Image (cartoon, rainbow, N blue to C red):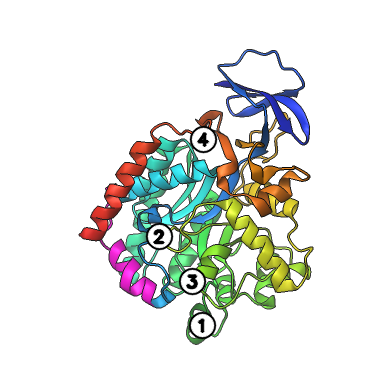
Amino acid sequence: MNILIKGVQLDGNTRDIFIKDGTIEEISENCIRKADKIINGKDKAALPSFINGHTHAAMTLMRGYADDMPLKNWLEEKIWPLEAKLTEEDIYWGSKFACLEMIKNGITVFNDMYWFWEATAKAVCDMGVRGFISAVFIDMFDENKGKEQIDLNLKLFELSEKYKPHVTFTFGPHAIYTVCRESLQWMRDFSEKHGILIHMHLSEIEEETKFSQEKYGLSPTEFLNSTGILSDRFIGCHGCWLDEKDCTILKNCNAKLVHIPVSNLKLSVGRMFPHQLLKNGLNIPFCFGTDGCASNNHLDIIETMKYASLLAKFSTNDPTMLPARETFDLATKTAASIFFLPEWEIKAGNSPDIILVDLNRPELNPGFDIYSDIVYASNGYIVDTVICMGRVLMENRYVPGDEEIMKQAKKTAKSLVAR
């Protein structure tokens, strides 16, 4: 499909943007090329879409179900018992609902770890977004369970071909306290051979560090380094309890991180992302994630950016930390590089997903600096239009079928809790 965006604000100038099959072919003051779809860009600004670096998408079904609880009780008394009841149909509607919410918030790419891999993959394709999808790999140090998980992931890896280009298969070892060394080493070898990303919880809670020291005599990062799994394909999520030695290892291995401030604050995990260490020269690439709606409640990267920027300033006592433009770039082009996506900037020859934000929103006025306004003053509701892989997914904040998706998701959630 050919798309022409007319008269949109781009880097402070009024421009036309011509997109052919997802690739930007022309940016000019007056494009006269014919298009299948023309979008009026008046009073809107064109920006690259946001990327959500860590989700459990189908947990939209659990939004508001178990709040204001200690983490251990939250998991053992509420979340795990409910997850034990989940079906493939549940996951499909929960993931579809998550995709809808992310589209509404200008997110076209997300990195997911959850049950019933294919249900999430189907939802991603049906909604037209991009998903890096992993099954939850947990073996609990049981050799037979480890073999079962390996067989399942081999099957899903082959199956994932039918869901391209919307879905990319990834590995999702849950954490060092739920996956044994041998399984991690198998994923290391298969990942290296096939170029597969590895998406894992890392140093989220103090108990994880204690477990690792007691079992291995090493920190979680040191243990992972001993397995050889750390590389430029490794994406560690949370990172709240990382120390300087850990960060040095991650940097030397070219590993990546995902900062998830809202979930970590809400679940009170005791420490926050190591901004002070990164400030002191340990420049580990990182992006932002929302986590699932059971812990964050909201799939909104704009909201997450504000929390991240403010926490960086507060934790380092430095108001210049994570300025608005840098924060925006972490959520877009840096995130794209972490997931080996094309260059995520609106330039001729590039193929980023594109969002249009409504400049008539009061939050974006008087309009001195659009990046400051986005990061510090707004939320996902400023997004008017979303284009993913050359297809318009939302225009004038309308996503086709949104009412039915919300209806079915609500019905599914109520049914799940009642079982």
> What range of the chain is rendered magenta?
73-89
Name the residue tied to disc 4: 397
Identify the amino acid type marked 1.
Tyr
Q: Is residue 86 magenta?
A: yes
Identify the amino acid type marked 3.
Leu
C-alpha distance separating marks 2 and 1 = 23 Å
Name the residue tied to disc 2: 136
- The C terminus appears in which quarter of the rendering? bottom left
Return the disc, 3 or 1, that comes first in the chain's sequence.
1
C-alpha distance separating marks 4 and 2 = 33 Å
Q: Residue 363 location in percent, x, y? A: 65, 46
On the rendered structure, is 8 left or right of 408? Answer: right
Name the residue tied to disc 1: 216
Q: Secondary structure at mark 1?
A: helix
Residue drawn at (46%, 45%) of the image: 101
Identify the amino acid type marked 4.
Arg
Identify the amino acid type marked 2.
Val
Residue drawn at (62%, 49%) of the image: 378
C-alpha distance separating marks 3 and 1 = 27 Å
C-alpha distance separating marks 4 and 1 = 51 Å
Q: Farthest residue toward the left?
A: 419
Q: In the rendered structure, are the residues bearing label 4 and label 2 in contact, judged by CB atoms less than 8 Å apart? A: no
Q: Is residue 117 magenta?
A: no
* Observer able to see residue 291: yes
Q: Secondary structure at mark 3?
A: loop
User: Are there few (<14), some (14-19), or many (20+) residues within 10 Å of tag 4?
Assistant: some
Return the disc, 2 or 3, that comes first in the chain's sequence.
2
Return the disc, 2 or 1, that comes first in the chain's sequence.
2
Q: Is residue 408 above or below residue 248?
A: above
Q: Is residue 17 above or below residue 173?
A: above
19 or 338: nearer the viewer: 19
